Image (spheres, helix red, strand yellow):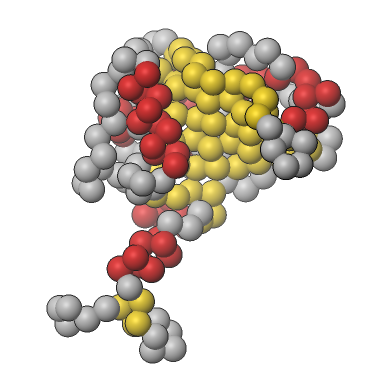
Amino acid sequence: MAGVAATGRRGTRRSPRGRAQARAHWRALPAAAACAPASLQPFLIEHGSLSELLRAHGRELRVLRLRQGLHAGPVGGSWAREVLLLLDGRPVVWARSVLPAQALRGPWRALRGFGTRPLGDWLFQRADVRRGPVELRRLGRADPAVRAAARALERAGLPPLPLGHAVPLWARRSAFVRRGCALWLIELFLPAAGGLRPGA
């Protein structure tokens, strides 16, 4: 009935804001992918190297490194890297990787001063790196990752991110574990990713 808020299992009323928050949770594959646009599903469900998959859809994959370095924090700080992946000059993915700062002196020391090489190229060449479950989420325009991607495009002088309600913005996240220490990676698929075709 119009004008009536949704009701939960126990008869409690759930506000539109509450429904939006419920939709915002990360969800595990494969069930979560069924809700995503068909054009994005091959990228969202890929458990191997996203860089390799993107290369199969274009001629040149380039990494635009936006930020990389140490950040102070309450428990030893962290290391973070933020990049845009450009396929044939078009931004298709915004990505952010984070790990504890102390890991740069241990299993992840190769990432110190990591250049413009795709991180996936390095990760998937290491036999001792294990990837955890991949989770998906549709992000609203107020999400910090979406806002960070919009700022990144602006700083890079690239076309702005359309933030209308009709534009689906999907992201995935997972942890890569090496010698007991996890690196978390989030990848936000930009609108151009939905138009990619194999062999283009």
> How far from the left and from the top, in percent, is residue 7?
34, 82
Q: Is residue 85 visible?
A: yes
Q: Residue at x 68, y 13 (%)?
A: 113
> How far from the left and from the top, in percent, is residue 16?
30, 68
Please give left or right for residue 135 compared with residue 101 in the image: left
> How far from the left and from the top, in percent, is residue 165?
23, 48
Rendered-image quadrant of the N terminus: bottom left
Q: Residue at x 33, y 44 (%)?
A: 141
Q: Is residue 189 visible?
A: no
Please give left or right for residue 68 compared with residue 91 in the image: right
Q: Nearer the viewer, residue 5 or 27?
A: 5
Q: Residue at x 40, y 81 (%)?
A: 8
Q: Nearer the viewer, residue 172 or 150?
A: 150
Q: In which quadrant of the rendered view does residue 195 lie?
A: top left
Rendered-image quadrant of the C terminus: top left
> How far from the left and from the top, in percent, is residue 152?
40, 24
Please give left or right for residue 111 compared with residue 56 in the image: right
